[in-house]
Image: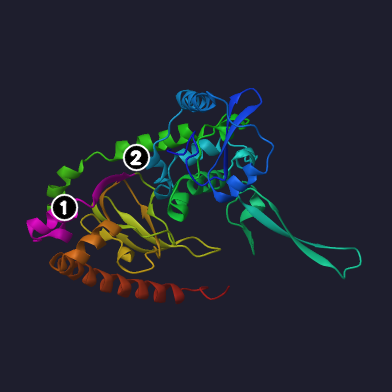
């Protein structure tokens, strides 16, 4: 993960045990140096620095587990992966992993009043995303299942931390594995999901050119322009019932549907999802990657086995910003689709609004 076992930055004082109850301390900031200067500590002895290096090397050699950082950073792209159900069947949602993780920081707020009722205080205390109450909003909790809570924890720790802070939230300490009463291993879960990701990527990027050229969306596009787009592509296979993307998640790509059907759905709280349209093979889904804030406005679910090519939105935006001809080719293909889909959605909403009982609630 690139996060240890040696601390290299962002610390005030770094401690390395060089002998039983004997630590080598060095400062990494002015505040750390000031603190060390005020301690009654003896200077490092000859050989202490070498002992510290040996201790770090030994810790590195005995790690025993590895994690694919690339897979970890993409966990938020597979919210419907069957592995979430597998791990949920074992997870007790006890929250031990969050209690011992050095980077977990979730809190809740409690209001406390005294017996007289004339004094109130608001306290912040530690909490865990594994408790049902943690996701409570007016009307109930958002994450009521073990599947949803474990997925929230590991996805935030490994994928969303990268987006928020530019680094992973896992330091590789192994405490979550040690303290899990059923022995769930975070590295094994990531590896299992990564294995299926690699299985689904059956077509290499260099072989996607002919598939793109065959798709109606790119019909008659200049081969040189098409070659530029290929560098942003990846191949996917989605099993029936899985989501290509979810409403309100970051819109970071669009999909060229090669085979199968995809249902575009809109989630309505308190009722079943509304089907807006069914997309067939030869069509595309997703244009939210073109428009800020780049967020999906609906769900896309595979009706049957779907084979699709994704085109990375951030990658393609960079390319069309530097190549106006390519940009024109892309936009002139998207605009008619956007217009038709918007009209189709309006008609579907009107249809739903006029259904018997639509306004009873």
Give neighbour class at mark 2: few <14, some 14-19, many 20+ (Cα, 10 Å). some
The mark that comes first in sequence, 1 or 2, is 2
Element on which disc 2 rests = helix
Q: Which residue lies furthest to the right in this view?
A: 116
Q: Name the residue under label 2.
A: 197
- Give the percent coordinates (x, y) of residue 263: 35, 57
Which quadrant of the structure image shows residue 94?
A: top right
Magenta part of the protein: which range?
214-238
Q: Does the CB distance between marks 1 and 2 fall below 8 Å?
A: no
Going by the image, does 303 lie left or right of 125?
left
Residue 274 position, x and y percent, is 43, 64
Q: Does the magenta stretch include residue 355?
A: no
- Label ID, residue 212: 1
Q: How many marks?
A: 2
Separation of marks 1 and 2 at Cα, in angstroms: 21 Å
Crowd around label 1: few <14 · some 14–19 · many ≥20 (10 Å):
many
Can residue 255 be seen here? The reply is yes
């Amino acid at each position: 993960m690139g996060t240890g076992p040696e601390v290299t930055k962002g610390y005030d004082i770094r401690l390395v045990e060089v002998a039983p109850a004997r630590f080598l301390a060095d400062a990494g900031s002015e505040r750390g140096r000031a603190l060390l200067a005020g301690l009654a500590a003896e200077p490092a002895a000859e050989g202490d620095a070498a002992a510290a290096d040996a201790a770090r090397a030994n810790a590195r050699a005995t790690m025993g587990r590895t994690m694919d950082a690339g897979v970890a950073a993409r966990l938020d792209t597979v919210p419907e992966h069957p592995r979430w159900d597998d791990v949920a069947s074992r997870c007790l949602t006890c929250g031990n992993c969050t209690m011992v993780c050095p980077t977990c920081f979730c809190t809740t707020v409690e209001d406390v009043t005294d017996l007289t009722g004339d004094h109130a205080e608001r306290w912040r205390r530690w909490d865990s995303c594994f408790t049902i109450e943690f996701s409570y909003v007016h009307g109930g909790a958002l994450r009521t299942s073990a599947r949803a809570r474990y997925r929230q924890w590991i996805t935030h720790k490994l994928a969303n931390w990268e987006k928020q802070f530019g680094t992973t939230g896992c330091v590789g300490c192994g405490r979550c594995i040690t303290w899990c009463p059923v022995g769930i291993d975070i590295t094994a879960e990531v590896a299992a999901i990564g294995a299926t990701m690699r299985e689904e990527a059956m077509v290499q990027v260099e072989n996607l050119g002919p598939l793109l050229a065959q798709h109606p969306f790119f019909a008659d596009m200049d081969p040189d322009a098409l070659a530029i787009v290929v560098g942003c592509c990846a191949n996917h296979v989605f099993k029936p019932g899985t989501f290509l993307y979810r409403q309100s998640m970051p819109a970071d790509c669009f999909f060229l549907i090669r085979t199968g059907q995809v249902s575009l759905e809109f989630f309505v709280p308190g009722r079943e999802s509304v089907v807006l349209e069914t997309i067939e093979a030869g069509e595309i889904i997703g244009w939210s990657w073109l428009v800020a804030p780049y967020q999906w406005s609906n769900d896309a679910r595979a009706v049957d086995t779907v084979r699709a090519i994704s085109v990375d939105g951030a990658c393609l935006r960079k390319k069309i910003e530097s190549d106006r001809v390519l940009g024109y080719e892309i936009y002139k293909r998207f605009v008619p689709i956007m217009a038709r889909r918007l009209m189709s959605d309006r008609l579907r909403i009107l249809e739903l609004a006029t259904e018997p009982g639509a306004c009873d609630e």
